[in-house]
Amino acid sequence: MKLQTTLFGKPYTFHSVKEVLAKANEQKSGDTLAGIGAADAKERVAAKYVLADLTVEEVTNSPAVEYSEDAVTRIILDDLDRAQYEKIKGKTIGELRETILDNLITGDRILTLARGMSSEVIAALAKLMGNLDLMYVARKLHITATCNTTIGKPGTFAVRLQPNHPTDDVKGVTASLLEGLSYGAGDAVIGSNPAIDTLKSTSDILNLFNDVKTRLHIPTQICVLSHITTQLEALKAGVPMDLCFQSIAGSEKALASFGTDVDMLAEANELMRQYGTSKGPNYLYFETGQGSELSAGAHNGADQLVMESRCYGLARHYKPFLVNTVVGFIGPEYIYDSKELIRAALEDNFCGHMHGLPMGCDICYTNHMKADQNDCDSLLVMLASAGCHYVMGIPQSDDVMLMYQSTSYHDIAAVREMLGLSPIEPFREWLESYGIWENGRLGKNAGNPRIFL
């Protein structure tokens, strides 16, 4: 294995595949603060040269956390399609990059090959690709999943309606919910983050969502994003639940910091299959975000992108209905500015798609980041063009409970109209029946929640 190169007469030597991967990564403040990123642009380019010449087999055999030490690693490697792996293991990462960027290769063929790629290999590909490369490949990968409705069909761009409230007041949640529906949001899921993680709050909101969904005959799915243990308690108590949610991470230690593990995720999947109120077969909703493992002290010396890609390797084991990266939520200690924000979102969208996941993005930033709403607008158009399955719909882009900025109902409606995209078909037909959606855009009753009363 060759881990050195010479660039402009200066030799560069790396000590492990993990170091090559970290230093080949585009600049992220988290990697820099952790002391694992490239010292400068020249070292980054040198690492990319070395990475391009490593084989798929060499990267696969160098997981971020050892197989014997980590349940996430075991899932990622045990799930590999060995027949596909044998076809590509001798290719270099540079050669594999050229393969997936070939305009003659189909998305289905890429997805078949990707079943033989470990999460580290997929992350390695991303490190050798420009932003447009990431968008170009992801756009070709058509991935569907079904809960009550089916997400991911070509020509659709879905929305998670996120009617959060700072005190979980049912009237406040209802007002936000009906407003979002009136702008065409909610086809991916109606899902709120509760302010208080209790059985009562979770149950009250789920019952509210189910009541509105049933009364108005809305073809969608409902979820409350409390901790997985709270949701399972509600499920066992007979509370209606279409999707079970959990934040996940790329190592066993980081999962433990979220209060979960791989066995709990498997249990949730089985309980949802038995007692959930959706038809399935996809019952789970996962959220991720670059920097989670580093913030938990559980990154094992690996960079943010590698650990994020491992989240998707874990996720694909459970065949979820939704996955999304919350790309700027942690703050500038991990994603510093708009350039890093855009890059991370495109990397995550690509890596999620390569893992065969229905991939969404919460395009968000905290108020102490060097980013603003114009950056969210730009990234929204880029992700919609790159085949992203869904984004968040939040009143005026301002989440009053989570205290961050994201994307609004109006933003998504504009992008759907501009790019010729539409909501998920049964939901679109439901919107048309209320005059909310007409001829590929918002209709005469858009923005008027009184039509539901």
Image (tube, rainbow, N blue to C red):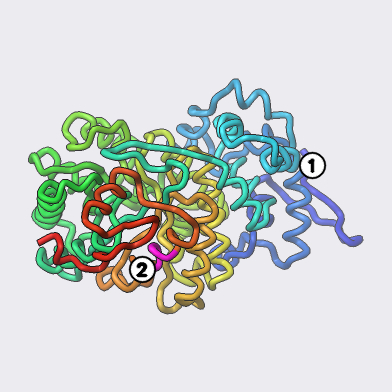
In the image, is residue 353 above or below residue 345? Answer: above
| Type of amino acid at the residue the image marks with label 2 | His
Please tell me which residue is depicted at 51% across the width and 78% down the height of the picture. Answer: 370
Residue 45 vs residue 380: left or right? right
Please tell me which residue is depicted at 69% across the width and 51% down the height of the picture. Answer: 128
Residue 344 vs residue 240: left or right? right
Magenta stretch prevailing secondary structure: helix
**In this view of the protein, which residue sits in the foreground, 139 or 73?**
139
Residue 253 coordinates in the image, percent (x, y) = 41, 47
Q: Which residue is mark 1?
A: 2
Residue 335 coordinates in the image, percent (x, y) = 51, 67
Residue 412, magenta (yes or no): yes
The circle on residue 67 is none
Asked if the residues shown at circle 2 and circle 1 are in contact, with their CB atoms under 8 angstroms apart, the answer is: no
Q: Callout 2 environment at 10 Å: few (<14), some (14 to 19), or many (20+)?
A: many
Can residue 437 be seen here?
Answer: yes
Quadrant housing the N terminus: top right
Residue 450 coordinates in the image, percent (x, y) = 14, 66
| Type of amino acid at the residue the image marks with label 1 | Lys
Marks 2 and 1, Cα distance to the nearest angstrom?
51 Å
Can residue 304 be seen here?
Answer: no
Q: Secondary structure at mark 1?
A: loop
In the image, is residue 314 above or below residue 132? Answer: above
The circle on residue 410 is 2
Q: Callout 1 environment at 10 Å: few (<14), some (14 to 19), or many (20+)?
A: few
Quadrant housing the C terminus: bottom left
Q: Quadrant of residue 328?
A: bottom left
Q: Residue furthest right?
A: 9
